[in-house]
Image (cartoon, helix red, strand yellow):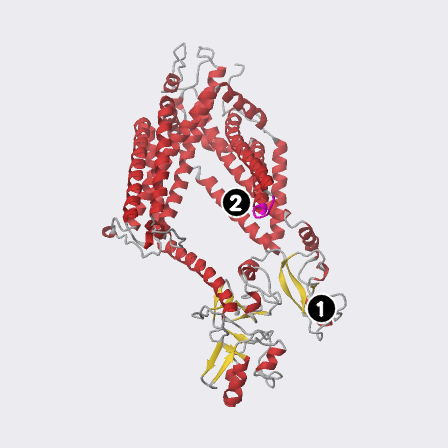
């Protein structure tokens, strides 16, 4: 029959071959790019500090020296210290200094107690290969070693922050006073001086302490979070298993009692929002009535649980609950008639899933693939950022001492230090990167085949990161599109089977086979469109962030925001089109543009049914996700907050720093589990509904063109076969 949909079990043909070729070429390029980056990158550059010679602390030849020591910390007192370099010498040490000491104290003690001279001098922190107790340095005083740049002029008791040694001085006072050390051994007071002779004061060191306190606070917070997650792993696993069981239970119940279950979820949602609104406003009133300083003002806290002592927190939560409650009530009132049709579609989707139960297991595969893509592209980003080479610059160079080299000029340590070793100038490590005028051919650790790649990165530093980012966007959207195409093929097989009571076989496996053999190019085409739109939006977002703190860019930023908003609208629109195009591809085996046109035409011809009904079913399915997430979240809250005890079954609540940490993690995992499995429901509804629209377009219910839809779905859509069929699905 002309226009009649072919059976998905019939022979398909390849679609969008050109896009398939482009996609494979992109993958080949990405593999080559990954091979170069993974063989040249070194993530240790980002994870561990680097000394003045460009050597990474904790790696060969300094495996036992994991910490970076600054000869003069006063030259590095800024937030950029952790990223950029300062002019002071920096070396790798086995441990950070534990005592306060200066070269003057060491010389005074050595003169007063010659027998302990070696013990005192061993407290000096010196450059590599410099032992103050061994010849030829044992004849020099500590002050002479400092003047020659061999050893640090002072050390302060320090702790390791991000692998760097920062002073841990406390109780210095608020006034700007000199740091004085009262030495009981010599009965003298010694001042601490920087390498340039400047006297160390409390203000100079306090700048470093402020950095340490902030960084240490963030580090401790992260360590506490990690501890809580580790201690709660068993309970997080139990919560995840309960989420899977509850999700499957709800899906099974929807197979037989879809209508009452959905209404029960709606009532539970409304009731929960009413209770949430009452409880939050009641807490606000109670805390507001308390006349304590702890609730009078709102301050930033690292402990999130402290926020619940502020009435402002409960007021904000109450307003949010009330707004959500109002929105839900309005939606239910306006769409009350459409909900009946949506429930029929959900019930029909439940039947289709019941006939193809393997579709409930299928989301695990794309989920694992997405995790793999995140790990791959994330690793690529790290290795790309660390594939740069160490750059060195000239420091302490006097006028005309080193030919064309001046302070700040790029240099190669081996050649520069050999030629200008006696001039006082040094070639020291700056950072990792690519310099425009750097002598790459002199780099000893760079292979010939890699030098051209380095020059390319040097000239266009942003391209590798953009390539990796675009690869992540394309691969992730491709996996999502392939997932939708496979499900659409399975459910389309169910719909276009006239006698659904005899629907047997392995529709999911057949759909996977057809999708891999014939329609990878179409998925690549659809995902490419989404990836390009996302990439454009990210670029404009980046430009907006760069212009945020610049004067006179208000109009430009406004235009960029408008463009970004348009890109977001386009992205959502094409996601909707792609989803329906994949359904048409699974039915007719036509190329992407033809399928998208067919799907869009069906939607345009049935705007109220297609758009409103689609969103209603999406809303009802999303309520199921929220119901499962909320239920598991409430159980987790009751357990970790000590409201309920499960010691009788061997579950003892762990001792946590923040009880909300495992709760949030369990809620996130539950939401991802529920939305992954309910996405099968959503795809089933979309496929069956679009198939029904196509069924009504090409068939009229006569004996020549009977409807393929079931009696229950036909009844809801007011469509009936004029001649009774011999056998019809129920």
Tell me residue 333's x, y (percent).
Answer: 35, 25
State the residue in front, 532 or 724. Answer: 532
Mark nearest the camera among 2 and 1 is 1
Mark 2, residue position: 373
In the image: residue 91, left or right of residue 636: right
Q: Which residues are magenta?
A: 546-552
Under circle 1, the secondary element is helix
Residue 247 in view, yes or no: no
- Look at the magenta stretch and give its main secondary structure: loop
Q: Secondary structure at mark 2?
A: helix
Label 2, residues with CA under 10 Å away: few <14, some 14-19, many ≥20: some
Q: Quadrant of residue 444?
A: bottom right
Q: Which residue does the numbered mark 1 point to in the structure image?
A: 416
Q: Residue at x 53, y 49 (%)?
A: 378
**Residue under the image location 59 percent in, 53 percent down:** 385
**Which residue: 32% across, 26% down?**
259
User: Is 551 part of what is drawn in magenta?
Assistant: yes
Q: Residue 287 placed where, x, y %?
A: 29, 48
The outermost residue toward the left is: 648
Q: Is 259 left, or right, of 210 in this rendering?
A: left
Give the vertical position of 363 relative to 546 (above or below): above
Query: Does residue 75 show up magenta in the picture?
Result: no
Quarter placement of the C terminus: top left
Q: Quadrant of residue 252?
A: top left
């Amino acid at each position: 029959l002309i226009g009649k949909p072919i059976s998905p079990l019939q022979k398909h043909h390849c679609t969008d071959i050109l896009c398939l070729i482009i996609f494979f070429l992109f993958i080949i390029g990405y593999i080559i790019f990954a091979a170069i980056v993974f063989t040249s990158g070194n993530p240790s550059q980002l994870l561990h500090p680097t000394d003045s010679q460009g050597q990474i602390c904790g790696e060969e030849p300094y495996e036992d020296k994991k910490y970076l020591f600054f000869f003069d910390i006063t030259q590095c007192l800024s937030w950029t210290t952790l990223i950029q370099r300062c002019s002071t010498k920096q070396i790798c040490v086995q441990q950070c200094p534990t005592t306060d000491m200066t070269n003057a104290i060491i010389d005074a003690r050595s003169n007063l107690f010659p027998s302990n001279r070696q013990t005192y001098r061993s407290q000096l922190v010196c450059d590599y290969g410099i032992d103050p107790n061994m010849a030829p340095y044992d004849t020099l005083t500590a002050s002479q070693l400092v003047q020659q740049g061999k050893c640090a002029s002072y050390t302060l008791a320090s702790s390791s922050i991000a692998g760097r040694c920062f002073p841990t001085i406390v109780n210095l006072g608020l006034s700007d006073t000199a740091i004085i050390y009262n030495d009981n051994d010599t009965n003298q007071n010694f001042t601490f001086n920087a390498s340039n002779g400047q006297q160390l004061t409390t203000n100079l060191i306090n700048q470093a302490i402020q950095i340490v306190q902030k960084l240490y606070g963030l580090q401790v917070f992260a360590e506490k979070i990690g501890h809580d997650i580790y201690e709660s792993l068993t309970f997080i696993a139990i919560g995840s298993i309960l989420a899977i069981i509850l999700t499957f239970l709800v899906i099974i119940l929807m197979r037989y009692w879809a209508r009452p279950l959905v209404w029960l979820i709606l009532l539970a949602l409304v009731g929960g929002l009413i209770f949430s609104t009452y409880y939050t406003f009641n807490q606000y009133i109670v805390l507001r009535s308390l006349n304590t300083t702890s609730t009078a003002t709102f301050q930033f806290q690292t402990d999130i649980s402290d926020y619940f002592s502020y009435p402002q927190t409960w007021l904000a939560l109450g307003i949010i609950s009330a707004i959500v409650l109002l929105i839900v009530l309005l939606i239910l009132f306006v769409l009350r008639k459409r909900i009946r049709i949506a429930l029929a579609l959900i019930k029909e989707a439940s039947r289709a899933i019941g006939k193809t139960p393997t579709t409930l297991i299928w989301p695990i595969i794309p989920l694992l693939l997405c995790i793999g893509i995140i790990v791959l592209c994330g690793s690529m980003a790290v290795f790309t950022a660390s594939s740069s080479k160490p750059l060195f610059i000239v420091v302490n160079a006097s006028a005309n001492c080193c030919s064309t080299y001046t302070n700040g000029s790029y240099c190669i340590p081996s050649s520069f230090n050999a030629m200008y070793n006696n001039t006082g100038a040094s070639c020291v490590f700056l950072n990792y990167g690519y310099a425009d005028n750097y002598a790459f051919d002199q780099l000893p650790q760079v292979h010939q085949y890699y030098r051209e790649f380095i020059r390319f990165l040097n000239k266009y530093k942003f391209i590798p990161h953009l390539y990796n980012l675009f690869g992540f966007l394309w691969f992730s959207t491709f996996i999502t599109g392939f997932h939708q195409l496979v499900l659409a093929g399975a459910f389309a097989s169910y719909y276009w089977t006239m006698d659904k009571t005899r629907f047997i076989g392995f529709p999911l496996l057949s759909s996977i086979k057809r999708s891999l053999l014939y329609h990878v190019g179409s998925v690549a085409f659809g995902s490419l469109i989404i990836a390009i739109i996302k990439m454009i939006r990210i670029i404009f977002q980046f430009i907006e962030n760069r212009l945020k703190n610049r004067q006179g860019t208000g109009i430009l930023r406004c235009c960029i925001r408008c463009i970004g908003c348009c890109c977001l609208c386009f992205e959502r629109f094409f996601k909707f089109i792609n989803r329906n195009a994949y359904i048409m591809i699974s039915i007719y085996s036509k190329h992407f543009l033809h399928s998208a046109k067919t799907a869009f035409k069906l939607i345009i011809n049935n705007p109220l049914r297609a758009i409103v009904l689609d969103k209603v079913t999406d809303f009802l399915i999303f309520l199921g996700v929220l119901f499962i997430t909320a239920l598991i979240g409430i159980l987790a809250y009751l357990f970790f907050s000590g409201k309920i005890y499960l010691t009788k079954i061997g579950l003892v609540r762990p001792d946590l720093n923040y009880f909300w940490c495992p709760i949030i993690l369990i809620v996130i995992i539950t939401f991802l589990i529920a939305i992954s499995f309910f996405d099968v429901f959503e795809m089933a509804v979309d496929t069956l509904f679009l198939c029904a629209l196509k069924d009504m377009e090409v068939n009229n219910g006569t004996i020549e063109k009977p409807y393929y839809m079931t009696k229950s779905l036909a009844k809801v859509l007011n469509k009936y076969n004029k001649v009774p069929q011999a056998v019809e699905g129920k």
